[in-house]
């Protein structure tokens, strides 16, 4: 039995990276015949590995018949790509004109000073990569900084330290007792209407949500925090990072599977009905914290 | 939801949605665009949901998350319905007070927007000078719909233009309507859209034709296209379908910057919904028309905003521009005829078809019809997106809408048109904003207006306003 928070997706940050050939073939198949094909392929590879490993590019060349000149040409022409491993956290400071006139260069310098690296570099402990970008399109609120996909506006040099601390602890970490963004929900199965709440098994001081879980030929139970905004859970089995599980109702044994996949990682979403009206959906991939809450 | 199999089905669905609506329903709207999210809108939305659930208010208060309203400086905000009150820069601790007041039809006066120049409380959003002086056709739609709900768009007369075209017009009539509207390319070049479409329609179609939406908005300071694509992706889908009908194109592509993940996500959802409803794909609304749209993401190359580089990028190559002729209309993606239009240009299409070209052309000036969305950024009090009729003066934008300088310093100039544009000094702020006036002054329309930092060398123009030399340009 494990007692762990659903950890954020861990980014590969050390060389050499083990490239799974099957992953690359799946990505190639996804974009076969698609306009912009090779660029989209490289984008997906970078999303998976946080950079473009040499081995991955070699597989792309072999499978598509493209020359290394063409593939490396694309990888070096477009600024979004990195041929070197990136840190666990990516810090992007916008130096577009609107942010520039509001002091963005000083913010960039402060990040450089606090991390001990120049823009374009990664810290020796492989935790942070710092880059400057030319315009992120949030120009009214400059200086803008994006860290791990989270946007921050009107950033001053005095805020840099706090942002780096928050990146290290995780932006989605919340103080469940005090945070107004966090609240308990009461859910039931959308198939059989039975309540999924377990008042006898408490997580985060609230009744937990009881689900059955299947993955890799294993079947077990999971008790999730019923705090929307909290991510703690207790699971019968240890679930490896990035595993996509099947969530089932422990009463009717029906699979909880939504119509549309997770917009972040494309794994299935698991819907549950919210008492009073509404649907909450959680991603079925271990490590992906995406969830949606729609009210009537 | 079963697939709509005729324009009549679409019309009936709209009637049902409208009959279910009750304008007296209590609700709140919160912008969930990128800029407001950067200011914490995500947290406010979550806190609002928490309040609704914990107080069992589902069905008693409606929450709508929308795209960009334009007043980015004041985000995250809560707008109340039907009151129309505007609470700017909302903090988590304010949520409970605002919601409690909305339920009673009351106001929280200390949290309402206060005009910084007069000190007056604005009880309704449209009293606020930033909004009052605009002419909001495109951005107004952003306020009313959740971009991830196709029914919001349909109820807001979405796809009514496509319905009209399929019911009542042949391709030639559509082309004439767009030409008569006087719509010019909103990416900044100002080429007449109707003419471009006519040229594409005249190309042979046996190998296929492409229409493209250029959402590679790279000019620093500009984010209008992001807001339209995030906030109203269905308007682009509808527009491109009309464009395909008029020109004979069979494939559509939206080329969007990778730096716009929310726009990509909302467009992906919208495309999926449009296909499910039979508004895109094979046999659209049983009309025998087949047309679909794919998304192609950019990868961080500014040059790919230029059409020949964009085409190469769509082809999966390095985005290197090439000589023209041949023009993309003759030989574009994979050598096929291709027409590329900017996001805002596309956003005007359903409006023109619904209103009619004559009505559309009443706004603006001669040869410069319609509205233009500007990004107003830099050292100005009210930063954000503004939609104004062509021909409005720079002074009206900077002072009436923008509220003047943000600090004590005077505004010395504005930069228009991004890296290809120029700076216009303060003594020329009576200049009307349209393609022709700005070109005469030595700049271009481009996409945005910005107050430049006060480092301009005044040599080169006379205080009276007549430029004796070309106006200074940014590098």
Image (spheres, coloured by chain):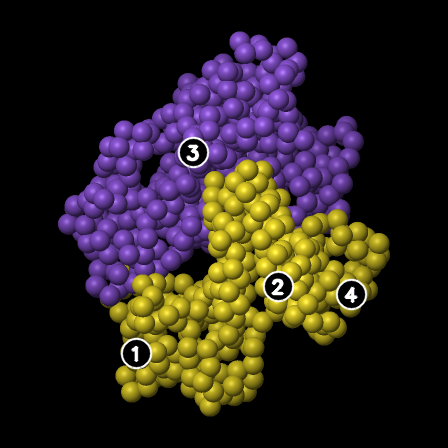
Q: Left or right of B265: which side holds B301?
A: right
Marks 4/1 same chain: yes
Judge whether residue A149 can be spotted in this image.
Answer: no
Q: Where is residue B104 in the image (x, y as percent from the top left)?
A: 15, 50
The residue pinned by badge 2 equals: A128
- Residue A56: image quadrant is bottom right
Q: Left or right of B299: which side holds B354?
A: left
Name the residue rendered at 59%, 24% in the picture: B456
Q: Distance between the residues labelled 4 and 3?
A: 49 Å
Marks 3/2 same chain: no
Q: Where is residue B251 in the image (x, y as percent from the top left)?
A: 62, 43
Marks 4/3 same chain: no
Between disc 4 and disc 3, the foreground one is 3
The residue pinned by badge 1 equals: A206
Asked if the residue under mark 4 is in contact with the one under mark 2, i.e. CB atoms within 8 Å, the reply is: no
Q: Where is residue B60 in the image (x, y as percent from the top left)?
A: 20, 55
Q: How far apart are marks 2 and 1 (CA)?
A: 36 Å
Name the residue rendered at 38%, 45% in the picture: B75
In the rendered structure, find residue B66 and report the number of the disc placed on it: none
**Helix, strand or loop at mark 2:** strand
The residue pinned by badge 3 equals: B406
Name the chain letter of the residue that bears numbered label 2.
A
The residue pinned by badge 4 equals: A54
Between B323 and B271, the residue placed more toward the observer is: B323
**Helix, strand or loop at mark 1:** strand
Instruction: Tell me if mark 3 has few (under 14), some (14-19) or many (20+) residues whose alpha carbon lies within 10 angstroms of its own.
Output: some
In the rendered image of the structure, the colour used to display chain B is: purple
| Pointer 4 or 1: first along the chain | 4
């Amino acid at each position: 039995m494990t007692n762990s928070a659903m950890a954020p997706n861990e980014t590969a940050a050390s060389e050499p990276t083990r490239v799974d050939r099957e992953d690359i073939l799946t990505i190639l198949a996804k974009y076969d015949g698609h306009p912009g094909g090779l660029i989209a392929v490289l984008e997906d590879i970078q999303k998976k590995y946080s950079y473009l490993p040499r081995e991955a590019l070699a597989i792309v060349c072999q499978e598509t018949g493209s020359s290394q000149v063409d593939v490396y040409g694309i990888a070096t022409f477009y600024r979004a790509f990195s041929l070197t491993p990136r840190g666990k956290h990516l810090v992007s400071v916008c130096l577009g004109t609107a942010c520039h006139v509001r002091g963005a260069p000083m913010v960039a310098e402060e990040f450089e000073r606090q991390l001990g690296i120049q823009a374009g570099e990664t810290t020796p402990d492989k935790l942070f990569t710092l880059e400057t970008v030319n315009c992120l399109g949030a120009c009214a609120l400059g200086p803008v900084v994006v860290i791990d996909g989270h946007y921050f506006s009107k950033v001053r040099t005095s805020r840099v330290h706090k942002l780096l601390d928050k990146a290290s602890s995780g932006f989605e970490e919340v103080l469940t007792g005090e945070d107004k963004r966090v609240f308990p929900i009461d859910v039931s199965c959308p198939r059989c209407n039975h309540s999924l709440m377990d008042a006898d098994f408490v997580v985060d001081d609230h009744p937990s949500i009881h689900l059955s879980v299947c993955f890799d030929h294993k079947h077990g139970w999971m008790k999730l925090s019923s705090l929307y905004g909290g991510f703690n859970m207790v699971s019968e089995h240890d679930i490896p990072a990035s595993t996509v599980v099947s969530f089932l109702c422990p009463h009717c044994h029906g699979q909880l599977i939504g119509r549309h996949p997770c917009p972040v990682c494309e794994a299935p979403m698991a819907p549950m009905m919210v008492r009073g009206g509404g649907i909450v959906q959680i991603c079925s991939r271990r490590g992906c914290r995406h969830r949606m809450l729609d009210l009537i | 939801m079963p697939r709509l199999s005729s324009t009549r089905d679409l019309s009936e669905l709209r009637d049902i949605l409208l009959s279910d609506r009750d304008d007296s329903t209590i609700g709140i709207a919160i912008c969930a665009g990128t800029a407001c999210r950067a200011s914490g809108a995500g947290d406010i939305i979550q806190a609002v949901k928490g309040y609704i659930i914990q107080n069992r208010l589902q069905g008693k208060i409606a929450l709508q998350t929308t795209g960009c309203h334009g007043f980015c400086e004041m985000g995250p905000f809560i707008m109340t319905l039907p009151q129309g009150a505007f609470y700017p820069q909302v903090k988590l601790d304010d949520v409970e007070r605002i919601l409690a007041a909305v339920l009673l039809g009351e106001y929280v006066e200390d949290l309402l927007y206060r005009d910084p120049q007069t000190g007056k409380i604005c009880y309704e959003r449209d009293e606020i000078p930033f909004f009052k002086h605009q002419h909001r056709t495109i951005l107004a739609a952003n306020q009313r719909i959740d971009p991830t709900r196709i029914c919001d768009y349909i109820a807001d007369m979405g796809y009514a233009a496509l319905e009209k075209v399929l019911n009542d017009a042949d391709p030639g009539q559509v082309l004439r309507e767009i030409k008569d509207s006087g719509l010019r390319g909103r990416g900044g070049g100002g080429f007449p859209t109707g003419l471009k479409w006519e040229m594409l329609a005249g190309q042979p179609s046996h190998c296929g034709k492409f229409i493209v939406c250029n959402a590679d908005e790279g000019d620093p300071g500009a984010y209008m296209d992001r807001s339209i694509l995030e906030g109203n992706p269905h308007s682009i889908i509808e527009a491109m379908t009309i464009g395909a009908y008029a020109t004979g194109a069979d494939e559509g592509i939206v080329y969007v910057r990778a730096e716009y993940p929310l726009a990509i996500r909302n467009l992906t959802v919208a495309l999926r919904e449009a296909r499910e409803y039979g508004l895109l794909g094979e046999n659209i609304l049983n009309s025998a028309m087949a047309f679909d749209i794919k998304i192609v993401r950019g990868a961080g190359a500014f040059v790919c905003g230029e059409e020949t580089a964009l085409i190469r990028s769509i082809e999966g190559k390095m985005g290197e521009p090439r000589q023209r002729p041949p023009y993309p209309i003759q030989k574009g993606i994979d050598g096929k005829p291709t027409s590329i239009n900017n996001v805002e240009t596309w956003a005007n299409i359903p409006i023109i078809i619904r209103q009619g070209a004559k009505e559309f052309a009443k706004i603006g000036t001669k040869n410069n019809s319609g509205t233009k969305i500007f990004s107003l950024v830099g050292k100005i009090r009210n930063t954000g997106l503004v939609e104004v009729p062509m021909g409005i003066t720079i002074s009206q934008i900077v002072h009436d809408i923008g509220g003047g300088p943000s600090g004590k310093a005077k505004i010395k100039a504005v930069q228009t048109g991004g890296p290809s544009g120029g700076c216009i000094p303060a003594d020329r702020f009576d200049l009307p904003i349209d393609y022709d006036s700005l070109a005469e002054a030595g700049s271009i329309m481009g996409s945005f207006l910005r107050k430049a930092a006060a480092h301009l060398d005044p040599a080169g123009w006379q205080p009276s306003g007549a430029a004796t030399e070309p106006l200074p340009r940014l590098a």
